[in-house]
Image: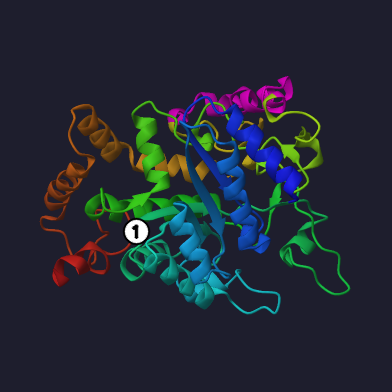
Amino acid sequence: MGDDVLDAHIRQFIGAQPTPEVTIAWQGGEPTLMGLEFFERSIACVEKHRKPDQQITYTIQTNGTRLDEAWCAFFKTHHFLVGLSMDGPKAMHNAYRVDKGGAGSFDQVRRGWKLLRQHEVDVNILCTIHAANADHPLEVYRFFRDELHAEFMQFIPIVERATSQSLPLVNRGWSERPGSPRALYTQTGSLVSGRSVGARQFGRFLCAIFDEWVRRDVGKVFVQAFDVALGSWLGQHNLCIASPTCGNALALEHNGDLYSCDHYVEPGYLLGNILEKPITELVDSDRQRKFGRDELDSLPQYCRDCEVLFACYGECPRNRFIDTPGGEPGLNYLCAGYKQFFNHIEEPMTVMANLLRQGRSADEVMGWCAERDQLRISGLGRNEPCPCGSGNKYKRCHGLSRRQG
Protein backbone atom coordinates (compact mmCIF):
# COMPACT_ATOMS: atom_id res chain seq x y z
CA MET A 1 0.00 0.00 0.00
CA GLY A 2 1.46 3.32 -1.09
CA ASP A 3 1.52 6.35 1.15
CA ASP A 4 -1.16 8.04 -0.98
CA VAL A 5 -3.61 5.21 -0.36
CA LEU A 6 -2.60 4.96 3.31
CA ASP A 7 -3.19 8.67 3.90
CA ALA A 8 -6.48 8.68 2.01
CA HIS A 9 -7.70 5.63 3.92
CA ILE A 10 -6.81 6.94 7.38
CA ARG A 11 -8.06 10.47 6.70
CA GLN A 12 -11.37 9.35 5.21
CA PHE A 13 -11.97 6.53 7.67
CA ILE A 14 -11.31 8.62 10.78
CA GLY A 15 -13.28 11.54 9.41
CA ALA A 16 -16.32 9.37 8.76
CA GLN A 17 -16.65 7.95 12.28
CA PRO A 18 -19.74 9.16 14.17
CA THR A 19 -18.39 8.22 17.62
CA PRO A 20 -15.14 9.04 19.45
CA GLU A 21 -14.12 5.37 19.58
CA VAL A 22 -12.40 4.32 16.35
CA THR A 23 -10.95 0.90 15.55
CA ILE A 24 -8.46 0.50 12.72
CA ALA A 25 -8.08 -3.14 11.65
CA TRP A 26 -5.29 -4.72 9.60
CA GLN A 27 -5.47 -8.16 8.05
CA GLY A 28 -4.29 -9.93 4.92
CA GLY A 29 -2.93 -12.12 3.52
CA GLU A 30 -0.24 -11.62 6.08
CA PRO A 31 -0.10 -7.93 7.08
CA THR A 32 3.34 -8.13 8.75
CA LEU A 33 4.84 -8.63 5.27
CA MET A 34 4.35 -4.87 4.87
CA GLY A 35 7.13 -4.41 7.42
CA LEU A 36 7.22 -2.64 10.76
CA GLU A 37 8.15 0.68 9.14
CA PHE A 38 4.85 0.74 7.25
CA PHE A 39 2.88 0.39 10.49
CA GLU A 40 4.95 3.08 12.14
CA ARG A 41 3.99 5.37 9.26
CA SER A 42 0.36 4.36 9.68
CA ILE A 43 0.45 5.41 13.35
CA ALA A 44 1.96 8.76 12.37
CA CYS A 45 -0.77 9.16 9.77
CA VAL A 46 -3.43 8.50 12.40
CA GLU A 47 -1.91 11.08 14.73
CA LYS A 48 -1.98 13.61 11.90
CA HIS A 49 -5.67 13.13 11.14
CA ARG A 50 -7.29 12.14 14.42
CA LYS A 51 -9.68 14.55 16.11
CA PRO A 52 -8.86 15.68 19.67
CA ASP A 53 -11.65 13.65 21.26
CA GLN A 54 -11.08 10.43 19.29
CA GLN A 55 -9.77 7.31 20.97
CA ILE A 56 -8.02 5.05 18.46
CA THR A 57 -7.59 1.33 18.94
CA TYR A 58 -5.82 -1.05 16.59
CA THR A 59 -6.29 -4.69 15.68
CA ILE A 60 -4.19 -6.96 13.49
CA GLN A 61 -4.54 -10.58 12.39
CA THR A 62 -1.30 -12.44 11.82
CA ASN A 63 -0.01 -15.97 11.32
CA GLY A 64 2.69 -15.10 13.85
CA THR A 65 5.64 -16.49 11.92
CA ARG A 66 7.40 -13.12 11.59
CA LEU A 67 6.88 -11.80 15.10
CA ASP A 68 9.96 -10.75 17.05
CA GLU A 69 10.83 -8.45 19.97
CA ALA A 70 10.45 -5.31 17.84
CA TRP A 71 6.99 -6.24 16.56
CA CYS A 72 5.70 -7.15 20.01
CA ALA A 73 7.11 -3.99 21.62
CA PHE A 74 5.37 -1.97 18.89
CA PHE A 75 2.05 -3.74 19.51
CA LYS A 76 2.31 -3.10 23.24
CA THR A 77 3.26 0.57 22.83
CA HIS A 78 0.29 1.27 20.57
CA HIS A 79 -2.22 -0.99 22.36
CA PHE A 80 -2.85 -3.41 19.50
CA LEU A 81 -5.24 -6.31 19.89
CA VAL A 82 -3.54 -9.17 18.04
CA GLY A 83 -5.43 -12.09 16.52
CA LEU A 84 -2.98 -14.98 16.25
CA SER A 85 -3.77 -17.82 13.84
CA MET A 86 -3.14 -21.19 15.46
CA ASP A 87 -5.04 -24.41 14.81
CA GLY A 88 -4.36 -26.45 17.93
CA PRO A 89 -1.55 -28.83 18.93
CA LYS A 90 1.44 -29.23 16.63
CA ALA A 91 0.23 -32.04 14.36
CA MET A 92 -3.17 -30.43 13.80
CA HIS A 93 -1.72 -26.97 13.19
CA ASN A 94 0.94 -28.25 10.79
CA ALA A 95 -1.56 -30.22 8.73
CA TYR A 96 -2.28 -27.17 6.56
CA ARG A 97 -0.23 -24.27 7.94
CA VAL A 98 3.04 -24.80 6.12
CA ASP A 99 5.66 -22.61 4.48
CA LYS A 100 6.65 -22.65 0.80
CA GLY A 101 8.91 -25.61 1.45
CA GLY A 102 6.10 -27.62 3.03
CA ALA A 103 7.42 -27.33 6.60
CA GLY A 104 4.91 -26.73 9.38
CA SER A 105 4.85 -23.34 11.11
CA PHE A 106 3.83 -24.45 14.62
CA ASP A 107 7.17 -23.78 16.32
CA GLN A 108 7.38 -20.28 14.84
CA VAL A 109 3.82 -19.44 15.84
CA ARG A 110 4.29 -20.72 19.37
CA ARG A 111 7.43 -18.61 19.66
CA GLY A 112 5.36 -15.62 18.51
CA TRP A 113 2.73 -16.41 21.15
CA LYS A 114 5.38 -16.47 23.88
CA LEU A 115 6.79 -13.12 22.77
CA LEU A 116 3.34 -11.55 22.73
CA ARG A 117 2.68 -12.78 26.26
CA GLN A 118 6.07 -11.63 27.48
CA HIS A 119 5.30 -8.14 26.19
CA GLU A 120 1.81 -8.32 27.71
CA VAL A 121 0.11 -7.72 24.37
CA ASP A 122 -3.64 -8.35 24.23
CA VAL A 123 -4.02 -11.42 22.02
CA ASN A 124 -6.82 -13.68 20.80
CA ILE A 125 -6.43 -17.15 19.34
CA LEU A 126 -7.93 -17.49 15.86
CA CYS A 127 -8.35 -21.22 15.27
CA THR A 128 -9.67 -22.45 11.94
CA ILE A 129 -11.65 -25.69 12.11
CA HIS A 130 -10.91 -28.09 9.27
CA ALA A 131 -10.59 -31.75 8.40
CA ALA A 132 -7.44 -32.23 10.50
CA ASN A 133 -8.71 -30.89 13.85
CA ALA A 134 -12.52 -30.98 13.72
CA ASP A 135 -12.78 -34.42 15.33
CA HIS A 136 -10.63 -33.36 18.31
CA PRO A 137 -12.54 -30.49 19.94
CA LEU A 138 -11.48 -31.02 23.55
CA GLU A 139 -7.86 -31.63 22.61
CA VAL A 140 -7.85 -28.34 20.72
CA TYR A 141 -9.65 -26.41 23.46
CA ARG A 142 -7.59 -27.81 26.31
CA PHE A 143 -4.36 -27.12 24.44
CA PHE A 144 -5.25 -23.45 24.20
CA ARG A 145 -6.63 -23.23 27.72
CA ASP A 146 -4.19 -25.40 29.66
CA GLU A 147 -0.92 -25.20 27.71
CA LEU A 148 -1.07 -21.71 26.24
CA HIS A 149 -3.30 -20.29 29.01
CA ALA A 150 -5.28 -18.45 26.35
CA GLU A 151 -8.35 -16.61 27.58
CA PHE A 152 -9.87 -15.48 24.27
CA MET A 153 -10.58 -17.84 21.36
CA GLN A 154 -12.36 -17.83 18.03
CA PHE A 155 -13.23 -21.04 16.19
CA ILE A 156 -13.62 -20.36 12.48
CA PRO A 157 -15.07 -23.06 10.19
CA ILE A 158 -13.16 -23.67 6.96
CA VAL A 159 -15.54 -24.01 4.02
CA GLU A 160 -13.76 -23.89 0.68
CA ARG A 161 -16.21 -23.91 -2.21
CA ALA A 162 -15.43 -25.54 -5.52
CA THR A 163 -17.03 -26.67 -8.73
CA SER A 164 -16.66 -30.14 -10.19
CA GLN A 165 -14.14 -28.69 -12.62
CA SER A 166 -12.05 -26.82 -10.04
CA LEU A 167 -12.19 -29.39 -7.21
CA PRO A 168 -9.08 -31.42 -8.21
CA LEU A 169 -6.99 -28.23 -8.38
CA VAL A 170 -8.51 -26.82 -5.18
CA ASN A 171 -7.76 -30.04 -3.30
CA ARG A 172 -4.08 -29.62 -4.15
CA GLY A 173 -4.08 -26.32 -2.27
CA TRP A 174 -3.81 -22.62 -2.96
CA SER A 175 -0.03 -22.31 -3.22
CA GLU A 176 1.83 -21.87 -6.48
CA ARG A 177 3.32 -25.04 -7.93
CA PRO A 178 5.82 -25.32 -10.79
CA GLY A 179 4.08 -26.37 -13.97
CA SER A 180 0.61 -26.11 -12.42
CA PRO A 181 -1.87 -23.21 -12.42
CA ARG A 182 -2.61 -21.59 -9.10
CA ALA A 183 -6.20 -21.97 -7.95
CA LEU A 184 -8.05 -18.65 -7.57
CA TYR A 185 -10.70 -18.78 -4.89
CA THR A 186 -14.15 -17.48 -5.76
CA GLN A 187 -17.53 -17.88 -4.10
CA THR A 188 -18.82 -20.36 -6.67
CA GLY A 189 -19.71 -24.05 -6.71
CA SER A 190 -21.72 -26.36 -4.50
CA LEU A 191 -18.85 -28.71 -3.61
CA VAL A 192 -16.20 -28.26 -0.91
CA SER A 193 -12.54 -29.14 -0.66
CA GLY A 194 -11.25 -32.09 1.31
CA ARG A 195 -9.87 -29.66 3.86
CA SER A 196 -13.31 -28.27 4.68
CA VAL A 197 -15.12 -29.09 7.89
CA GLY A 198 -18.40 -31.00 7.65
CA ALA A 199 -21.58 -29.32 8.86
CA ARG A 200 -22.49 -31.82 11.60
CA GLN A 201 -18.80 -32.25 12.36
CA PHE A 202 -18.59 -28.53 13.14
CA GLY A 203 -21.74 -28.75 15.25
CA ARG A 204 -20.26 -31.59 17.31
CA PHE A 205 -17.04 -29.61 17.70
CA LEU A 206 -18.87 -26.61 19.16
CA CYS A 207 -21.13 -28.74 21.37
CA ALA A 208 -18.23 -30.65 22.93
CA ILE A 209 -16.30 -27.51 23.80
CA PHE A 210 -19.41 -25.74 25.06
CA ASP A 211 -20.20 -28.62 27.42
CA GLU A 212 -16.79 -28.31 29.03
CA TRP A 213 -16.77 -24.51 29.01
CA VAL A 214 -20.21 -24.09 30.57
CA ARG A 215 -19.26 -26.39 33.46
CA ARG A 216 -15.92 -24.86 34.42
CA ASP A 217 -14.77 -21.87 32.35
CA VAL A 218 -17.57 -19.29 32.18
CA GLY A 219 -16.11 -15.90 33.04
CA LYS A 220 -12.55 -17.20 32.72
CA VAL A 221 -12.32 -18.26 29.06
CA PHE A 222 -14.12 -16.29 26.37
CA VAL A 223 -15.14 -18.11 23.19
CA GLN A 224 -16.54 -15.80 20.53
CA ALA A 225 -19.20 -18.26 19.32
CA PHE A 226 -20.56 -18.62 22.87
CA ASP A 227 -20.48 -14.89 23.62
CA VAL A 228 -22.29 -14.10 20.36
CA ALA A 229 -24.88 -16.79 21.05
CA LEU A 230 -25.54 -15.38 24.52
CA GLY A 231 -26.05 -12.00 22.90
CA SER A 232 -28.66 -13.56 20.63
CA TRP A 233 -30.49 -15.01 23.63
CA LEU A 234 -30.53 -11.46 25.02
CA GLY A 235 -31.87 -10.01 21.79
CA GLN A 236 -28.54 -8.48 20.76
CA HIS A 237 -26.69 -8.88 17.46
CA ASN A 238 -22.95 -8.66 18.09
CA LEU A 239 -21.44 -10.20 14.94
CA CYS A 240 -22.34 -9.75 11.28
CA ILE A 241 -22.79 -13.46 10.56
CA ALA A 242 -25.35 -13.79 13.37
CA SER A 243 -27.26 -10.60 12.54
CA PRO A 244 -30.24 -9.92 10.28
CA THR A 245 -28.14 -7.61 8.11
CA CYS A 246 -24.45 -7.05 7.41
CA GLY A 247 -22.35 -4.77 5.24
CA ASN A 248 -19.99 -3.15 7.76
CA ALA A 249 -16.98 -5.46 7.30
CA LEU A 250 -15.66 -3.93 4.08
CA ALA A 251 -12.23 -4.74 2.68
CA LEU A 252 -9.72 -2.23 1.33
CA GLU A 253 -7.03 -3.48 -1.04
CA HIS A 254 -3.53 -2.05 -1.33
CA ASN A 255 -4.42 0.03 -4.39
CA GLY A 256 -7.45 1.70 -2.80
CA ASP A 257 -10.11 -0.62 -4.19
CA LEU A 258 -12.96 -1.07 -1.71
CA TYR A 259 -15.03 -4.29 -1.64
CA SER A 260 -18.38 -5.05 -0.01
CA CYS A 261 -16.92 -7.59 2.43
CA ASP A 262 -13.61 -9.22 3.29
CA HIS A 263 -15.14 -12.52 2.14
CA TYR A 264 -16.10 -11.07 -1.23
CA VAL A 265 -12.93 -9.55 -2.63
CA GLU A 266 -14.03 -10.36 -6.17
CA PRO A 267 -14.78 -8.18 -9.21
CA GLY A 268 -18.53 -8.47 -8.74
CA TYR A 269 -18.32 -6.85 -5.31
CA LEU A 270 -15.97 -3.96 -6.08
CA LEU A 271 -17.60 -0.73 -4.91
CA GLY A 272 -14.97 1.65 -6.25
CA ASN A 273 -11.65 3.20 -5.35
CA ILE A 274 -11.17 5.60 -2.43
CA LEU A 275 -8.75 7.72 -4.45
CA GLU A 276 -11.57 8.43 -6.87
CA LYS A 277 -14.61 8.51 -4.59
CA PRO A 278 -14.84 9.03 -0.80
CA ILE A 279 -15.36 6.03 1.46
CA THR A 280 -18.58 7.50 2.81
CA GLU A 281 -20.16 7.59 -0.66
CA LEU A 282 -19.11 4.02 -1.39
CA VAL A 283 -20.36 2.68 1.95
CA ASP A 284 -23.66 4.57 1.68
CA SER A 285 -24.25 3.51 -1.93
CA ASP A 286 -27.46 1.72 -2.88
CA ARG A 287 -25.34 -1.23 -3.97
CA GLN A 288 -23.74 -1.68 -0.55
CA ARG A 289 -27.02 -1.16 1.29
CA LYS A 290 -28.58 -3.88 -0.82
CA PHE A 291 -25.62 -6.15 -0.07
CA GLY A 292 -26.31 -5.72 3.65
CA ARG A 293 -30.08 -6.26 3.35
CA ASP A 294 -29.66 -9.38 1.22
CA GLU A 295 -28.42 -11.34 4.25
CA LEU A 296 -32.02 -11.42 5.48
CA ASP A 297 -33.94 -10.87 2.26
CA SER A 298 -32.35 -13.86 0.51
CA LEU A 299 -33.15 -16.39 3.25
CA PRO A 300 -35.19 -19.38 2.08
CA GLN A 301 -38.49 -20.10 3.82
CA TYR A 302 -36.93 -23.10 5.53
CA CYS A 303 -34.69 -20.68 7.47
CA ARG A 304 -37.48 -18.20 8.17
CA ASP A 305 -39.48 -20.99 9.83
CA CYS A 306 -36.50 -22.30 11.85
CA GLU A 307 -36.67 -22.31 15.65
CA VAL A 308 -33.12 -20.95 15.94
CA LEU A 309 -33.40 -18.20 13.33
CA PHE A 310 -32.90 -15.59 16.07
CA ALA A 311 -29.41 -16.98 16.79
CA CYS A 312 -28.32 -17.71 13.24
CA TYR A 313 -30.06 -15.62 10.56
CA GLY A 314 -28.67 -18.01 8.00
CA GLU A 315 -25.04 -17.29 8.97
CA CYS A 316 -22.76 -15.76 6.35
CA PRO A 317 -24.19 -15.62 2.80
CA ARG A 318 -20.88 -16.90 1.44
CA ASN A 319 -21.79 -20.36 2.79
CA ARG A 320 -25.34 -20.47 1.41
CA PHE A 321 -24.84 -22.74 -1.55
CA ILE A 322 -26.89 -25.87 -0.86
CA ASP A 323 -30.63 -26.57 -1.17
CA THR A 324 -33.14 -26.92 1.62
CA PRO A 325 -34.84 -30.31 2.19
CA GLY A 326 -37.69 -28.98 0.04
CA GLY A 327 -35.36 -28.06 -2.82
CA GLU A 328 -35.21 -24.29 -2.28
CA PRO A 329 -31.75 -22.83 -2.97
CA GLY A 330 -29.82 -20.67 -0.51
CA LEU A 331 -29.41 -22.90 2.54
CA ASN A 332 -26.18 -22.53 4.48
CA TYR A 333 -23.74 -25.42 4.07
CA LEU A 334 -23.23 -25.39 7.87
CA CYS A 335 -26.96 -25.30 8.69
CA ALA A 336 -27.17 -28.78 10.21
CA GLY A 337 -24.25 -28.05 12.51
CA TYR A 338 -25.52 -24.68 13.68
CA LYS A 339 -29.01 -26.07 14.28
CA GLN A 340 -27.51 -28.90 16.34
CA PHE A 341 -25.40 -26.45 18.35
CA PHE A 342 -28.08 -23.85 19.06
CA ASN A 343 -30.62 -26.46 20.13
CA HIS A 344 -27.98 -28.16 22.28
CA ILE A 345 -27.15 -24.98 24.24
CA GLU A 346 -30.73 -23.71 24.60
CA GLU A 347 -31.18 -24.49 28.32
CA PRO A 348 -27.89 -23.15 29.70
CA MET A 349 -28.07 -20.12 27.41
CA THR A 350 -31.56 -19.35 28.73
CA VAL A 351 -30.24 -19.66 32.28
CA MET A 352 -27.32 -17.30 31.59
CA ALA A 353 -29.54 -14.78 29.82
CA ASN A 354 -31.95 -14.76 32.76
CA LEU A 355 -29.08 -14.35 35.23
CA LEU A 356 -27.83 -11.32 33.35
CA ARG A 357 -31.31 -9.80 33.17
CA GLN A 358 -31.45 -10.09 36.96
CA GLY A 359 -28.16 -8.23 37.31
CA ARG A 360 -26.33 -11.39 38.33
CA SER A 361 -23.24 -13.04 36.86
CA ALA A 362 -23.45 -15.50 33.98
CA ASP A 363 -20.87 -17.73 35.67
CA GLU A 364 -23.56 -18.85 38.14
CA VAL A 365 -24.64 -21.22 35.37
CA MET A 366 -21.76 -23.48 36.38
CA GLY A 367 -23.48 -24.21 39.69
CA TRP A 368 -26.72 -24.91 37.86
CA CYS A 369 -24.88 -27.38 35.59
CA ALA A 370 -23.22 -29.08 38.57
CA GLU A 371 -26.57 -29.64 40.28
CA ARG A 372 -28.13 -31.06 37.12
CA ASP A 373 -25.15 -33.31 36.46
CA GLN A 374 -25.22 -34.61 40.02
CA LEU A 375 -28.85 -35.57 39.65
CA ARG A 376 -28.21 -37.25 36.32
CA ILE A 377 -25.18 -39.30 37.36
CA SER A 378 -26.72 -40.78 40.48
CA GLY A 379 -26.41 -44.51 39.85
CA LEU A 380 -24.85 -43.95 36.41
CA GLY A 381 -22.67 -46.82 35.20
CA ARG A 382 -19.04 -46.19 34.19
CA ASN A 383 -19.69 -47.46 30.65
CA GLU A 384 -22.88 -45.47 30.05
CA PRO A 385 -22.87 -42.31 27.90
CA CYS A 386 -21.71 -39.23 29.80
CA PRO A 387 -24.67 -36.96 30.61
CA CYS A 388 -22.79 -33.94 29.28
CA GLY A 389 -23.65 -35.01 25.74
CA SER A 390 -20.09 -35.49 24.47
CA GLY A 391 -20.82 -38.96 23.13
CA ASN A 392 -18.03 -40.51 25.24
CA LYS A 393 -18.48 -43.04 27.98
CA TYR A 394 -18.85 -41.51 31.45
CA LYS A 395 -15.60 -43.11 32.63
CA ARG A 396 -13.73 -41.48 29.71
CA CYS A 397 -15.30 -38.05 30.14
CA HIS A 398 -16.59 -36.32 33.27
CA GLY A 399 -16.19 -39.51 35.24
CA LEU A 400 -12.45 -39.27 34.57
CA SER A 401 -12.20 -35.70 35.81
CA ARG A 402 -14.37 -36.63 38.82
CA ARG A 403 -11.96 -39.44 39.82
CA GLN A 404 -8.95 -37.21 39.27
CA GLY A 405 -10.55 -34.52 41.45
Which residue, given by chain and number where applicable, does mark 1 sit on? 391
Q: Quadrant of the C terminus?
A: bottom left
Look at the numbered disc 1 and give the secondary structure of its residue. Answer: loop
- Residue at 65% in and 63% down: 35
Above or below 222: residue 97: below
- Residue 188 is at least partly visible in this image: no
Amino acid tagged 1: Gly
Q: Position of residue 23 (x, y in %)?
A: 51, 40
| Magenta span | 281-310
Taking the image as shown, residue 122 lies to the left or right of residue 314, namely left
Q: Nearer the viewer, residue 183 or 220?
A: 220
Above or below 79: residue 92: below
- Residue at 41% in and 59% down: 121
Q: Quadrant of residue 193?
A: bottom right
- Residue 149 is at least partly visible in this image: yes
Query: Looking at the magenta stretch, what is its main secondary structure?
Result: helix
- Residue at 68% in and 23% down: 290
